[in-house]
Image (cartoon, grey):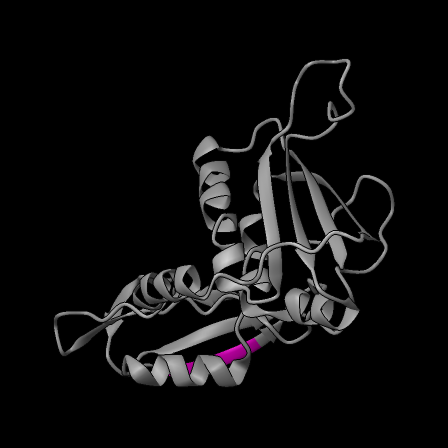
Amino acid sequence: MIRHVVMIKFKKDAPQDKIDLFLSEVKKLPHLNPEVRDYSHGLAVKWPRFHSGDFDFANCCDIDSYEAMERYMSHWSHVRMTPFLPDILENLLSFDWEIDYHGPAFDEQAAKEEGEREAKRVIPIHEDPAKAYVPELRGRTIEQAREMLAKVGLELGNVEEVLGSCWAPNRIMVATPEFETVVDKGTKIDISITGDWLTGPALPMGQAAW
């Protein structure tokens, strides 16, 4: 069993509504990602004697094997979290180790319920037959995006590669117009995808890879 921990420091001027949005979305990971065996997260303790003073938030999940970790990292539910971070992230630390503990089995019923809610959120259907909502394409592959757009009567537009990657290359990080924007049927949606290197190139201290 592999234990995977991510610790995050928020920017001092990060908008609270964007922090709240990130926190609400990251809570969905254990129900959307079938590789998660056990999961917890929370805000860091601020008492200065504790070792968490340099961070604001952490999450932890247990995963069966290294192969399962690869699937977890490249699953759309994980990759889609990256676009929530540029406006709020100052620093991130991630580490993993092997443990002898085995967490509970994947909760199929909870996953089904969360999946049904998420399907309605990800591909909303407009009540006007001439209009469409832009689906939630972030974290998806180009082929998945084509299928999702076709379901609501939209088309794929220009494809641009953006800097870096979050564990999985060629995944959508930005869609224009944005998710839930109301457009005419037949509108082309432009996307930006991740590059083919892991979490972005090395940059001088103080610079970010976004």
Q: Position of residue 153 (x, y in %)?
A: 27, 83
Q: Looking at the rendering, which quadrant does residue 164 occupy?
A: bottom right
Residue at 55 percent across and 67 percent down: it is 34
Q: Is residue 39 visible?
A: yes
Residue 188 or 53: which is nearer the viewer?
53
Q: Quadrant of residue 196?
A: bottom right
Q: Which residue is drawn at 50% across and 37% down?
A: 19
Residue 108 placement, left or right of 208: left
Q: Give the range drawn in magenta.
A: 155-159
Could you tell whether 94 is left or right of 124 in the image? right
Residue 157 horizontal side relative to residue 101, left or right: left
Check the image and report above or below for 95 versus 185: above
Q: In this view, does 23 lie above or below 144?
A: above
- Image: 169 above or below 53: below
Q: Where is residue 65 in the image (x, y as percent from the top left)?
A: 76, 67
Q: Which residue is drawn at 61% across and 26% down?
A: 12
At x 86% / y 41%, what residue is drawn? Answer: 205
